């Protein structure tokens, strides 16, 4: 095995054009890690934020990393080497993972490459019922839906609020998913349905057929309908869009209900929510191999379907980022390595 590989590297912050496909040193598995030959890697919002240098955040949050960086948290591939003390996986195993997140939030997790090292605690066997492209699309989005709706899976301090995030029982409840066509949204629809909820999906009209296929009981096209005019007495809104105008959803939630914010930055309705008796909560998604194994059973048996928007070769990572910047993504964008 060569000590070099191909990777998509970042030598400066900027737009999609700063992504460079080039030779890079192949990583070596450290104690507790395995080396994965990557078959596919998917794009996630933190990739875009880091590529841009987190310029949307206040300057004190801007990273000051050592270049070059390799973006990419979500991978699916094959174990090719095992580090000392790592005994859960063997050479030849097909695996998937969200790599070192949020630990490497500001430095890149290394997924846009032919090889990546992953701690065995972050890995799960790839579900047999899906291919590497679908498996690569899943980890961050699936773990986000799982940790918001089923189980946070850890007791680390919550960076967004003073209290731990607590999922709410969903059986027999009405759940509205805003941004239902995207990576997190289309999985949240399916996980909520699996848990016995009645689901209202909010997205643009192009997603309606897909979301009804995935189990949405009701669909609202936000481009021609004001959501708060038609949705009432919802038990839970999970918002996968973000932004300042999300507080408008408070009017559709019943007293005692909840608003879960996948991206809480910019939300300004905490006082109104408290006055209405609505719990507003968020959590930081974290790598978790055992949860990926558990949720992977739903991918395996078809209870949950991973939708792929488009695929690009690893060398075309900048084109993939251009696609992401156009918006209206259905599911996930995946790089094939």
Image: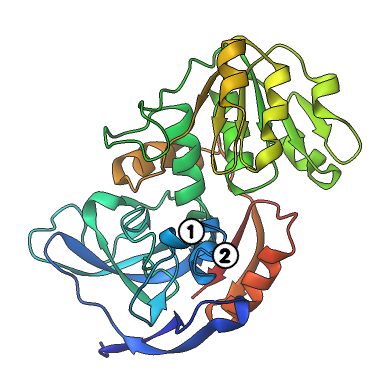
Closer to the camera, 312 or 158? Answer: 158
Q: Residue at x 36, y 65 (%)?
A: 109
Q: Give the answer, above or below, for where 100 lies relative to 177.
A: below
Earlier residue among tags 1 and 2: 1
Picture quarter with the N terminus = bottom left
| Secondary structure type for disc 2 | strand
Q: Which mark is residue 136?
A: 1
Whether tag 1 and tag 2 are in contact, CB under 8 A, the answer is yes
Closer to the camera, 17 or 29? Answer: 17
Q: Distance from label 1 to label 2 (Cα)?
A: 7 Å
Drawn side of residue 62 relative to residue 225, left or right: left
Q: Residue at x 73, y 18 (%)?
A: 251
Q: Residue at x 50, y 86 (%)?
A: 21
Q: Residues within 10 Å of mark 2 (few under 14, many from 20)?
A: many
Q: Residue at x 29, y 36 (%)?
A: 157
- Identify the residue position indicated by label 2 in the image: 334
């Amino acid at each position: 095995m060569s000590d070099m590989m191909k990777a998509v590297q970042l030598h400066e912050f900027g737009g999609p054009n700063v992504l460079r496909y080039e030779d890079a040193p192949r990583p070596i598995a450290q104690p507790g890690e395995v080396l994965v030959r990557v078959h596919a890697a998917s794009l996630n919002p933190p990739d875009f934020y880091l590529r841009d240098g987190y310029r949307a955040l206040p300057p004190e949050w801007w990273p000051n990393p050592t270049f070059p960086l390799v973006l990419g948290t979500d991978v699916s591939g094959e174990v090719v080497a095992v580090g000392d003390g790592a005994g859960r996986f063997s050479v030849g195993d097909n695996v998937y993972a969200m790599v070192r997140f949020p630990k490497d939030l500001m430095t890149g997790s290394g997924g846009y490459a032919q090889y990546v090292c992953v701690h065995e605690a972050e890995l799960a066997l790839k579900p047999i019922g899906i291919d590497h492209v679908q498996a690569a699309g899943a980890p961050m989005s699936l773990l986000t839906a799982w940790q918001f709706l089923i189980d946070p899976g850890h007791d680390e301090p919550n960076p967004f609020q003073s209290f731990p995030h607590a999922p709410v029982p969903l059986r027999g409840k009405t759940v509205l998913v805003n941004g239902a066509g995207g990576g997190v949204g289309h999985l949240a629809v399916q996980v909520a349905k699996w848990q016995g909820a009645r689901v209202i999906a909010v997205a643009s009209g192009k997603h309606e057929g897909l979301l009804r296929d995935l189990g949405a009981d009701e669909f609202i096209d936000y481009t021609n309908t004001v959501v708060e005019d038609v949705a009432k007495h919802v038990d839970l809104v999970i918002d996968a869009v973000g932004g300042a105008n999300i507080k408008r959803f408070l009017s559709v939630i019943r007293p005692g209900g909840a608003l879960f914010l996948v991206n809480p930055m910019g939300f300004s309705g905490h006082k109104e929510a408290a006055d209405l008796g609505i719990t507003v909560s968020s959590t930081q998604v974290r790598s978790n191999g055992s949860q990926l194994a558990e949720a992977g059973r739903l991918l395996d048996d078809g209870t949950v379907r991973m939708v792929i928007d488009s695929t690009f070769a690893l060398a075309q990572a900048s084109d993939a980022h251009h696609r992401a910047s156009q918006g209206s993504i259905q599911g996930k964008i995946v790089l094939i390595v």
